[in-house]
Amino acid sequence: MIIVGGVYAVEELNDASPEYIEKYYQKSLNSFNEQKYEESLNHIRHVIKSDMTNFKLRYLAAHNHWKQGNFDTAIIHFERAIKTSPEISGPYIDYALMQIHRRHLGRARKVALKGIQNLRTHKKEIPSKLYNILSRIDLLQNNAKGALAYAEKAKAVFDQKETGVKDKLEAVVLEARAHLSLSDYAKAEFSMLWGLSFRQESPYLHNLLGYIYQQWYESEKGKSPEMASDLKEKALEQFNIALKSPNLVQSFKELIQKNIDKLS
């Protein structure tokens, strides 16, 4: 069958060899990385009928459709990728992130929890990212205690197995935000100082720490003027560090400046 449309006419093969399928997967991946999403999908369409259970084709198709805003089709491909290889964590993570992006938080939670359950069933390590996703969902649903519990689980994974910085930093930031929501400012400060110990150049982290000091200052200014004054100075210091960071987008600059103005 030949389908005409997209970037070129697509012949759908029923008998492509594994080597040929891999060749077109690589073509599709290259197109995806060049943000040519329909072209990437056409490479997949060319060979997918030859192996309808091919995990890599399904997973990449899901991402292409997500990028194009075809969420229902992306869901179909994510779910088929999961059915094909339920022991691989990536589809659960990205599927849940897509649902968070759409603010379908209940659906995102179900996907993440299903991932944890299936990975356990297959005796696979549970990546910290799945716990971070659940922590983020709880924060968005104003469940700070739940968010804190999942952030701590994410950190525990790193203590045992993982060595990367990005997801560990995310867990620490989520932990800090959960402590802040619970008005436990000292613990929120501790988490953020820990985060800054391995990514000191981040204006986002400095801004968040400044905001923690700002909220702490507001809670103390009527009770302990001396402590409040110290917290105010710390908040301004962190906001100004963030503001001096290069390559800030204008909207973030305006946010930081608003925080400074509130303390002036």
Image (cartoon, grey):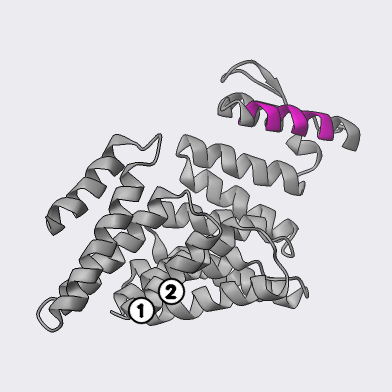
Q: Which mark is residue 190?
A: 2
Element type at mark 2: helix
- Specify whether residue 252 is in view: yes
Q: Are marks 1 and 2 in contact (CB under 8 Å)?
A: yes
Q: Dividing the image into 4 quarters, which one contains the C terminus?
A: bottom left
Helix, strand or loop at label 1? It is helix
Can you say whether 214 is above or below 33 in the image?
below
Magenta segment's dominant SS is helix
Chain part drawn in magenta: 22-32
Along the line of sight, which residue is nearer the eye, 124 or 199?
A: 199
Residue at the spot 57% in from the left edge and 37% down from the top edge: 64
Residue in view at x 70 percent, y 60 percent: 83
Q: Amino acid at mark 1?
A: Ala
Q: Is residue 7 left or right of residue 224?
A: right
The Cα–Cα distance between marks 1 and 2, rounded to whole angstroms, is 6 Å
* Residue of label 1: 186
Q: Where in the figure is residue 133, as x and y percent of width and height? A: 50, 65
Work out which residue is located at the far top of the displayed protein and give it: 8
